[in-house]
Amino acid sequence: MTEHTERVHEPRIAVYPGSFDPVTLGHLDIIQRAAKQFDKLIVAVLNNLSKQPTFSVEERKELLRQITRHIPNVEIDSFRDLLVNYMEQKQGHVIVRGIRSVTDFEYELQMASTNQKLNPRVETIFMMTNPKYSYLSSSMVKEIAKFNGDVSELVAPEVELALRDKFKDTN
Ligand code: PNS
């Protein structure tokens, strides 16, 4: 067997990292498309101790689990390390990030270049967000939900319920 054939059979593991506070249909679209490209896709929620999220890491993971139940090669996890260290730990080859617009690009390029510098073995792959969701962000969704707006076309029903519950005492 040549070195090339051996490499072809190595499982391709990708990691889709993010805050997912909460996961939107834009994220779900990327998860579904990325899962088709790799043997395993790990969706990894950043456990950022210096940030005050709306949903706890456990809540965010549970929502991700619920809405990706139908995709067998998706695993939900969290990390609090440098992303490149987490990649090593999970034997991940590729970081997946979605790009909505040129405004995302500068930040994403900076992050991908930093990760490349920290670990040149890890590759970042950008996927274009479905234009249907190009304006969508978790913060926008929270803003709408806080004021009792309709988010049914922006998030999965499970997330809509969780948002309603989270903000029920806000108004
Ligand atoms: O959904 P987000 O908030 O845009 O995701 C950002 C994330 C989690 C991908 C990024 O903040 C990250 O990877 N943080 C982990 C710390 C790290 O590795 N930093 C160095 C690369 S910038």
Image (cartoon, rainbow, N blue to C red):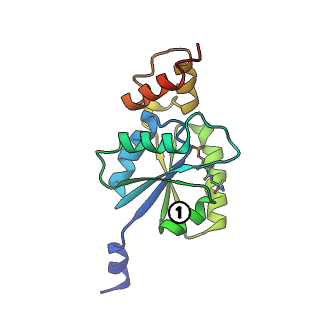
Residue 11 location, x and y as percent? 36, 69
Residue at screen point 47% across, 37% down: 23
Q: Is residue 2 visible?
A: yes
Residue at screen point 50% across, 44% down: 58
Farthest residue, direction right:
50
Q: Quadrant of the N terminus?
A: bottom left
Residue 130 location, x and y as percent? 42, 36
On whether ligand 1 comes within 8 Å of the CB at mark 1, the answer is no
Q: Nearer the viewer, residue 167 or 12?
A: 167
* Residue 87 shown left or right of residue 33 in the figure: right
Count of residue discs: 1
Element type where label 1 sits in the image: strand
**Quadrant of the image occupied by residue 38:** bottom left
Q: Quadrant of the C terminus?
A: top right
Residue 124 location, x and y as percent? 53, 58
Is 137 situated above or below 83?
above
Is 55 situated above or below 167?
below
Residue 94 location, x and y as percent? 48, 61
Farthest residue, direction front:
169
Q: Is residue 154 visible?
A: no
* Residue 165 shown left or right of residue 79 in the figure: left
Farthest residue, direction bottom:
1
Pointer 1: what residue? 123
Q: Which amino acid, by three-letter code, is at mark 1?
A: Glu
Query: Counting other residues with Cα less than 10 Å from the Cα at mark 1, is it few (<14), some (14-19), or many (20 or more)?
Result: some
Residue at screen point 47% across, 65% down: 92
Q: Nearer the viewer, residue 79 or 114?
A: 79
**Quadrant of the image occupied by residue 41:** bottom left
